Image (cartoon, rainbow, N blue to C red):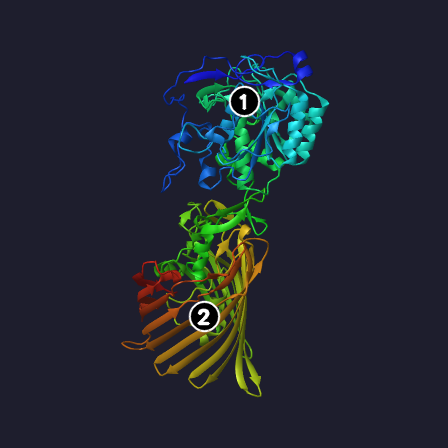
Amino acid sequence: MSRRNMQWRAGAALALALGLVACGGAGGGVATVPVPTPSPTPTPTPTPTPTPTPTPTPTPSAFDTGEYRRSAAVQVQALVAYDRGVSGQGVTIAVIDSGVNPALSEFSGRISPASRDVASNRAMADERGHGTSVAGVALAARNGSGIHGVAPLATLLALRADVPGSCTDTGCTYAASAIATGLDLAADVGARVVNLSLGGEGTTSAVRAAAARAAAAGVVTVLAAGNDALASPSGFANQLVAVASSTTLVVGAVDSAGAIADFSNRAGLLAGNYLVAPGVSVRSFNQDGTAFLYGGTSIATPVVAGAVALLANGFPGLTGAQIVDILLSTADDLGAPGTDEIYGRGMLNIARAFSPVGGISSGGSLVSFGGSIGGPLGDGGDLRGALAAVPVVDAYQRPYTANLSGSIGQAPTGRLAARLLAQPVAQAVVETGSSAAAFALNGDNRNQWAGDRATMAALAPGAPTGAISGHMLLALPGGQRLAAGHGEGVASLLALADPCLAPPQAITADPAQPLGSRPLGAAALAQPLSTPLGDFRLALAFGQALLPVERSAGAALARGLSTTAVLRLSRQFGGLTLAGEARFDDERGSLAGSRLAAGFGLAGATTSSLGVSARLALGRIKLAGDWRRAQSRLRLGSGLIRGSDGLSGAAASVSAQAAGLWRAGDSLVFTVTRPLALAGPLQLAGFPAPVWAGPQARETALEAGYALPLVAGGRLQFSLFHRDNPGHIAASPDDDGAALQLGWRW
């Protein structure tokens, strides 16, 4: 294969009098280096260019062909666009140059009927091949032969602008009036991009005005920087950027290794509008269809013009200025960091241009990744699957589908044995009659723990291993009992104030707070209440707990706050105690303990529940049962979750306890617990139908425990436990084990 340099060399006087010249290889004015008509040559071997290491994919791209790898498209990573079904279809590229050979199969069926000679009334033809080779790099057909263009399905608006009779062995010249006419025609017929592989020391006011009109119509103009190895692009490029900066790109040439070509004008004063693209040994073909390796900024320019067409095809809503901004902001930085005087904004990268720019948003909010689903929501049900294909847009409102499922961790299900850590390892109790005060050092290091709940990896291994808590219990006149504490939750304080309804001592007791939460404090009051319907007992409780600072998938979530209020009314009928309970849980930044980053729009939730309890004493046998129904209402901001009718669910537990079986003070207890599970529909932004959120399995916990008093205030307790579908997750392994607890009080 022969090599051709695309050069320009006309002096300033000629440029201003007759217009502009083709811009290419090294030094001066125009055209291709003349070569004899080549004899038929075998399929040429192009100069090798480094192939970007592809990201491994399950199925190789059907577009990664030999034809693709011989083209300039490979170096600018156009494969991403092709795999999205984008090849420039429906987009018109105007090439103002020396014309094309319309008989070539590379353009068959894709030459706009508006194509014409804008310098005279000649037939469409190309005397020197400059325009044909440029058009080939931009949009030659994908036909399995030779090369294909960067936008192989785009439409060609061929505008022949060479001055009649000016083409010689050294090239052609171009009249300014013809270029102005071509710019206006391109805008009139709806071309999205104009390729001007031309250069010169300046141009006329008519060309500048036409360039401004094209910019106003949203047309992107792509200009060759020039081939004099100067510190800045040509005067022609400078003048057009001055009148249409937001829609104009200036293109320099690099070799296959990404180094600036020795002949290429550098970015200089136009660094903000300057990109580089392959411009050394780039394969194309002349007016006869014969393959050559070309060099020059003229041949680099259509690479960028093709990229413009791909973006216009892939994202039709983009304006010309947005396309220019995307290509500039996604270029690979070369040379000195940032925009520099050699490479300008850097190397054209189509793959990056097709990726989200400036962050992605859903439902109008910037998507921040991270969080965890668990607790009553279990594995999240269909919600987690829906997060694998979330409609989002980037800063330019371009639509994408984002897989957010990997950013959402699974909250740990915990192990029942770990709850043993919540028992006091040191406790001081002061009792005065029926009143008491207690101070305890708990072994529960969860209260001080900070880390990734999805992996349970600690972020602060040197953190304290215990938490200090304490409470005070006062028996007041009239049967009132008041309990208040620090570092203890509502459930424990309510059990102190209203012991008749306290649940049996069991590892499987439903925890009052989510795993990793830190109770701040609580207070509970129980007192008799006489009514015409009989004597009741009224209990009130209030408390707060902090949810930990959480890191999941690299995103930090702020500390959450949970506030709980309980109202309970009970009545005793001999050995039977019945109670009704209303509970209100207000969460800031969470839903039943599940945490989602701000981009999901979850500001918090309020869960209201109604429950009933029964306690029956039959001599040494005590039976207990609890059931509650809960309804959660989400507080939503702007984000992925756009609406919800609420989540609902239930929890239940039953137990049987026998005392004094073998010796005084011993007890045997059997407990079955079904922890709270919540489920319901969520409306997600961009989804046509609500998505069901909630567990796909229900946890059931079983426990058998035996407690035996020892001498000197000691107590020995042994438990066997089993959890099926821990955390309401079907895939979770069963949680089985045994626990032995030994302690003394003095």
**Crowd band around label 1 with a 10 angstrom C-alpha radius: few (<14), some (14–19), many (20+):** many
Q: Nearer the viewer, residue 48 or 21?
A: 21
Three-letter amino acid code at disc 1?
Asp
Judge depth for marks 2 and 1 and give the one in front.
1
The numbered mark at residue 617 is none
Q: Residue 143, can we see it?
A: yes
Q: How many marks?
A: 2
**Residue 621, image x and y in percent?**
34, 80
Q: In this view, does 598 lie to the left or right of 450?
A: right
Identify the image quadrant of the N terminus: top left
Q: Residue 357, can we see it?
A: no
**Crowd band around label 2 with a 10 angstrom C-alpha radius: few (<14), some (14–19), many (20+):** some
- Say which label, 2 or 1, has the lower sequence index: 1
**Quarter-of-image position of residue 624:** bottom left
Residue at 33% over, 64% down: 724
CA distance for labels 2 and 1 = 79 Å
Determine whether 36 is above or below 99 in the image.
above
Q: Nearer the viewer, residue 683 or 728?
A: 683
**Residue 708, image x and y in percent?**
31, 70
Q: Is mark 2 on a helix, strand or loop?
A: strand
Q: Which of 404 and 502 is in front in this view?
A: 404
The numbered mark at residue 650 is 2
**Quarter-of-image position of residue 272:** top right
Q: Nearer the viewer, residue 440 or 702?
A: 702
Q: Is mark 1 on a helix, strand or loop?
A: loop
Identify the image quadrant of the C terminus: bottom left
Q: Mark 1 points at which residue?
A: 126
